[in-house]
Image (cartoon, rainbow, N blue to C red):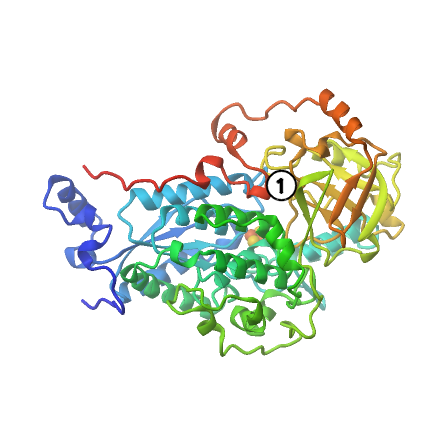
Amino acid sequence: MSISNPSPKRSPDQLRSQRWFAPDDLRSFGHRSRLRQMGYSAEDAQGKPVIGILNTWSDLNQCHTHFRQRAEELKRGVWQAGGFPVEIPVMSLSEMFMKPTAMFYRNLLAMETEEVLRSHPIDGAVLLGGCDKTVPGLLMGAISADVPSLLLPAGPMVAGRWKDVKLGSGTDVWKYWAERQAGCLSECAMREIEEGIARSPGTCMTMGTASTMAVLCETMGMTLPSAATIPATHSAHSRMATRCGRRIVEMVWEDLRPATLLTQASFENAVVADMALCGSTNAIIHLIALARRAGVPLSIDDFDRISRVVPVIVNLRPAGEFLMEDFHDAGGVPAFLNQLRRHLSLDCRCANGRTLGENIEDAEVILPEVIRPLENPLRQAGGTYVLRGNLAPDGCVIKPTGADSRLFKHVGPAIVFHSYADLKNRIDRDDLEVSADHVLLLQGSGPSGAPGMPEWGMLPIPKKLLRQGVRDMVRISDARMSGTSYGTCVLHVSPESAVGGPLALIHDGDMIEIDLEARRIHACVSDQEFANRKSLWKPAERCHSRGYGRLFLDEVTQAHEGCDFRFLERGAPTAEPDIF
Ligand code: FES
């Protein structure tokens, strides 16, 4: 038996799993005999790191259909390195099929991950995730369990195609759907687009939330170098799986845990990368949640501070032109980070045991039109702005790239929608009095409002304005927006309307101002009038009185706090289980 053990900090008898298997007592006899029941012999498991492969495969997760094969390839690597692989299914959060939104269940996956890791004889874990909320959910749990962990992102799907046009997930859906609503595209063309826009396993191949989170995790050293961008169907993705299997065994011997990798500096590096990617606004919520789990102070103001000095250099949709496979071919995350090195803390440690600086130092940009040099960025600064004012005292966010610059400073009368159902009912009615100067406001779509803060923040443009050629308007909500979306959409208004935030108190016709350069959002409503309206405001009836929904409503934090559950954020580490 050969065990790869390059710089051991732990000996076999110090493995966590040995508490289950090593003692000469009745309980351990039971554990060992049940391994035999599954067909394993002493040589398979004894004295070896037990590696949990937490697999978010499901028949209803369109982005993870290759994960059964990847799990087998991972196991091969674990065996090669002298570990003992065990595959454990955990909740799969399908961004497309879960309602009201996969975000509603991110914290449930985090809880499951933490408890699965803690309650089993597991020494290290590989987290198989990709589709939007699976990555933060898995990582939040792994941070709290604090066992050596490595993420294998699902990888992006191949580019979509319609006739001679390359299609990008989400971004082109919104674009062509608006054209259809405007009467500029036939039903037949829409069906052809439906056929060609998602045509392989893997995550959305624009710079949506899945791509953003994968890149940020690689930046923080939670993946192996280059793992974030390898397309899901490439044979390199299979080889990466096997490498992850080998490496996690070493990480167990080295006792390299999330707490070592996830520091203040590595989170700041992730924010730098997020701004330079013009990443999904969802990443702000997830990074704050991850940081709080790791005990690292990180606030939305850190994103704004960093966005003022870091240029956008990745030319991917929706902010730019290209797709994830182009990003990979351009050199991927190592080349991207090498361009940014003057903004990064290079001595942060990564999962492969090297520093970030060592990992990226020789990485070259192959396609400079995709990963642009700092001197020729897509945009000088401002991946995401954080706005504050009397409409959002705890902040809100907007991605100016992809918004119409004529709207960066805008004043207009509000049209208020009280829920998404209200929006759907009225937005396309001919008697809706709306012009391109109006500001569309959506209430009731925040963390506890919808609940789960769905991606409703890119409110549709009214059909009658689409037919007049209008393609962007100021839209404000306490919702999130898909990372693949675009437009002048102010999101994550905090506190949300469902808890009585100022957004709940806006009436039709109130004048609303936004000024992006001044980072300001303001409702022209006096303090006295706000107080009067607040005294009359009543919360909506709670939509869950039992079960997980009730727990969610009781415990979820606001958008600027990361939407985790209060009782999961902090506190003393949970004790190891007794084994009696
Ligand atoms: Fe899974 Fe977009 S639907 S990543």
The picture places residue 488, in percent across and down from the top left corner, at 76, 51
- At label 1, counting other C-alpha atoms closer than 10 Å, the crowd grade (few under 14, some 14-19, many 20 or more) is many
Give the quadrant of residue 421. top right
Q: In this view, does 570 lie to the left or right of 520?
A: left
Give the quadrant of residue 427. top right
Where is the N terminus found, in terms of image quarters?
bottom left
Q: Give the number of marks.
A: 1
Where is the C terminus found, in terms of image quarters?
top left
Query: Which element carries disc 1, helix, strand or loop?
Result: loop
Location of mark 1 (residue):
454
Q: In this view, does 219 lie to the left or right of 383?
A: left
Which residue is depicted at the point 47% across and 50% down? Answer: 296
Which residue is depicted at the point 72% across and 34% down? Answer: 503
What residue occupies the far left of the structure in this picture?
Answer: 24
Q: In this view, does 239 lie to the left or right of 97?
A: left
Give the quadrant of residue 536. top right
The picture places residue 546, in percent across and down from the top left corner, at 49, 24
The picture places residue 9, in percent across and down from the top left corner, at 25, 62
